[in-house]
Amino acid sequence: MSALASGDFWAFVGVVAGIYTILALGLQLEFGFTGLLNFGQVAFMAIGAYTMAILVVKEGLSTWLAAPLAVGASALAGVLLGLPSVRLRADYFAIVTIAFSEIIRYVAMNAQSLTGGSQGTIALGKVGEAAQYNGQWERFQAWVQGVLHASNDVAMLVIVWVVAVALLVLVWLAVRTPWGRVLRAIREDEDAAASLGKNAFAYKLQSLALGSALGGVAGVFYAWQFSFFSPDDFQPLLTFFAWMIVILGGLGRVWAVPVGALVFGFLFAGTRFLDFAPLSYLDSAERAYVRLIVIGLAIIALVVLRPQGLLGRRDQMVLE
């Protein structure tokens, strides 16, 4: 059976799309509803993934206890980043966030004893500790299979999307409350919101913390899915993938995020099979760049023809 027709392959694509849904949901909350131009969302994904791995391998915690602590660490990192920077103008805040994401990546690369460094989590801790981590991961996988009677990717597909839908519902309900209406007011005119007695700084910090926590959840699932990861897996490109998803679906629309993630996942995975002439004359590395070009052209066409995204509305666009 070809890879194109393989159910396991598309189940894996669905898992990755679910992880990106959670990652991009944080950006939708921060930018689509609050106007925070975060170009460093991948940093919180990395913090979530590495925190869970460190707690499990070095501290011997179970994955069930380490996961919420990892999400909490991502949220705390968002607060610590936002305290000195959330008052900055949008473009300056964007520079700070992308710099922060690179700082996190380089710390992970150089803190060999803590993160495994450039060798990744395969070098995290001692051999016995690594075996303990792998054993807990295998027990988790066995439990999932026992419940769902499916392959690893299909089982993870169900779990990731159950969590993603639950988070989508929670965010959708939250932005329909007075709290969410204040976020929209800040996005449209922060000075006007402040003149009505709203603490714009506090609301923006709350939005950043929650968006960072969602990035942490994505990192936890990334760690569960791949087990092995390294700093190179958290390049700034991942943040821009999440931005593509938000733009594809539409700004300020919670339920547009999974639509954008599925479309992006299909484009990104489907272009893997562009192996006909003249593309067949290129090696795999060159075809990988062609895939990104095809995805970029598709997104440019969408922005030109439908700038509000697939499900967005022009009157809710932040950038005119």
Image (cartoon, helix red, strand yellow):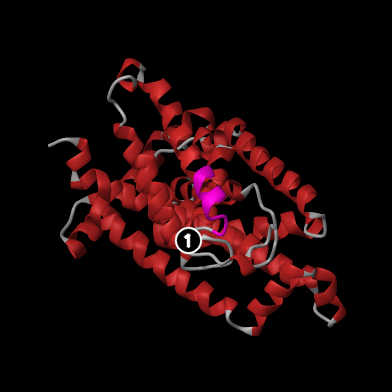
From the viewer's perspective, is 32 left or right of 234? right
Please identify the quarter of the rendering in which residue 161 is found. bottom left
Within the magenta stretch, is there residue 301?
yes
Residue 163 visible, this angle? yes
Residue 230 placement (x, y as % from top left): 48, 35
Relative to 302, say whether 206 is above or below: below
Q: Name the kind of residue labelled 1 in the image.
A: Val
Q: Which residue is mark 1?
A: 257
User: Which secondary structure is most common in the magenta stretch?
Assistant: helix
From the viewer's perspective, is 285 left or right of 243? left
Relative to 182, say whether 46 is above or below: above
Residue depicted at 56% across the width and 37% down the height: 235
Please identify the quarter of the rendering in which residue 121 is found. top left
Residue 162 placement (x, y as % from top left): 35, 67
Residue 103 placement (x, y as % from top left): 68, 39
From the viewer's perspective, is 6 left or right of 63? left
Per the image, label 1 sits on a secondary structure element best described as: helix
Residue 138 visible, this angle? no
Q: Residue furthest top?
A: 281
- Give the quadrant of the N terminus: top left
Residue 9 placement (x, y as % from top left): 25, 43
Relative to 296, say whether 11 is above or below: below
* Nearer to me, 228 or 4: 4
Q: Residue furthest front?
A: 305
Please give the range of residues in magenta: 300-308
Residue depicted at 60% across the width and 47% down the height: 43
- Give the quadrant of the C terminus: bottom right
Relative to 105, say whether 46 is above or below: below
Residue depicted at 24% across the width and 50% down the height: 152
Within the magenta stretch, is there residue 46?
no
